[in-house]
Image (cartoon, rainbow, N blue to C red):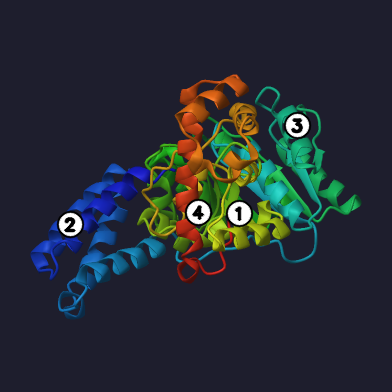
Amino acid sequence: MAFESLASRLADTFKKLRGRGKLSEKDINQGLREVRLALLEADVNFKVVREFIANVRERCLDAEVLESLTPAQQVIKIVHQELISLLGGRTHPLDISGPPPAVIALYGLQGSGKTTTAGKLALQLKKSGRRVLLVSCDVYRPAAQKQLEVVAGMAGVSFFTLSDRVSPEVIAKKGVEKAVESAHNVVILDTAGRLQIDDEMMDEARRIKEATLPRERLLVVDAMTGQEACQVAEEFDRVVDITGVVLTKLDSDARGGAALSIAKVTGKPIKFASLGEKLEDFQVFHPDRMASRILGMGDVLTLIEKAEAAFDQQKVAQMEEKLRRKQFTLEDFMDQMKEVKKMGSFGDLIRMIPGFARAQVDVDFDPKELARVEAIINSMTPEERQNPDIISGSRRRRIARGSGTTVQEVNRLLKQFFQARKMLFQMGSSDKRLGRLRLF
């Protein structure tokens, strides 16, 4: 995740504050200096950092905070609230109201991920019952139109374009007309980008806007570009009056400064975040949830949504009952490992749980390893699968021989199983904290 380094720095800073008990003005100023450095190292715009720190300091130096019995917690609460404000304050849904078709134009520099984002957005809208038409307006990049056609096929939505000798604004207008004829209620325009902003690209963006009157004009921004993203956003906003931002590559090790700067600099909300290469790796952007993750508070609501989408509810109920009875076998482990894989990295999922934000969980599996894991488990006796604690050294050697693996590989699997079981039992006993979360 893009904010891991920042989250780690902030966690260390707040740990120091909690260790001091009652806080003085000097303590708060020292803590905020560390927060300021952490934000600047995350490539957050320096003007944004200056205003953010000033707002936090003013609220933290209030008498109620300094005289509180838990001043450090009050400081963290203030930082959390200010982070939410910095990230846009609230969730901004996509506006596809009004008479169909609703036109959504995607803008951005070349390489920002517009074409993949078009497919991700199309898939999400399709799942909500919309009939989507993807339109390729990129007549410059080799195979750009073919790429979007492939993406449309993967998303299971319709595709339209014309010859690359036709102007982009004409393709866009004809695409909207096609949508009207074929009863599509959403049109997504994938526009061309450049390596950097130039007058030709801006003029083309303006012409497409005038030709199709898109209800949503979304700027697709690569989170790894840092502060440069703010400059790009300001220029596109000036020309086409963007309605929101889509942040891509938030799953990378980028410093995350774009996400923490762009909403404040442009005054336009972040509407979506792309968190992986698959079409399913696409989420509505929730400022409060992101702020909580940055501060190590977890993100239970997103975890709930992922679980509800991925799991069969009957199986969930059965596993709930087993966890209440503190039962979790290697067969359960194998079944759940396959299901959890649909949701992404198990380590990332665990870190969405409050209290586990910085957990190092070694229970992720490469898909190629699943067959080997299954072979190991199938080489065990029914008793060993039901009660792995009885598996001694001699049993491990027998299992390794029977599965064609090594004792080290058997040991690694058992270690991963015991880690997962411990985590799940802790989660299962935290009903009050996790509310309606039912991951397994």
Label 2 belongs to which residue? Answer: 16
Which numbered mark, 1 or 4, is in the foreground of this view? 4
Q: Position of residue 80 (x, y in %)?
A: 35, 64
Q: Splitting the image into 4 quarters, where does residue 439 fall?
A: bottom right
Residue at the spot 10% in from the left edge and 68% down from the top edge:
25
Label 1 belongs to which residue? Answer: 306
Q: Mark 2 or mark 4, which has the lower sequence index?
A: 2
Q: Position of residue 60 (x, y in %)?
A: 21, 70
Q: Position of residue 231 (x, y in %)?
A: 42, 44
Which numbered mark, 3 or 2, is in the foreground of this view? 2
Mark 4 burial class by Cα count in 10 Å: few <14, some 14-19, many 20+: some
Label 4 belongs to which residue? Answer: 424
Distance of mark 3 from mark 1, alpha carbons? 26 Å
Which numbered mark, 2 or 4, is in the foreground of this view? 4
In what element is the residue under mark 4?
helix
In what element is the residue under mark 3?
helix
Label 3 belongs to which residue? Answer: 150
Which numbered mark, 4 or 3, is in the foreground of this view? 4
Q: Nearer the viewer, residue 375 or 9?
A: 375
In what element is the residue under mark 2?
helix
Q: Nearer the viewer, residue 308 or 334?
A: 334
Q: Mark 4 or mark 3, which has the lower sequence index?
A: 3
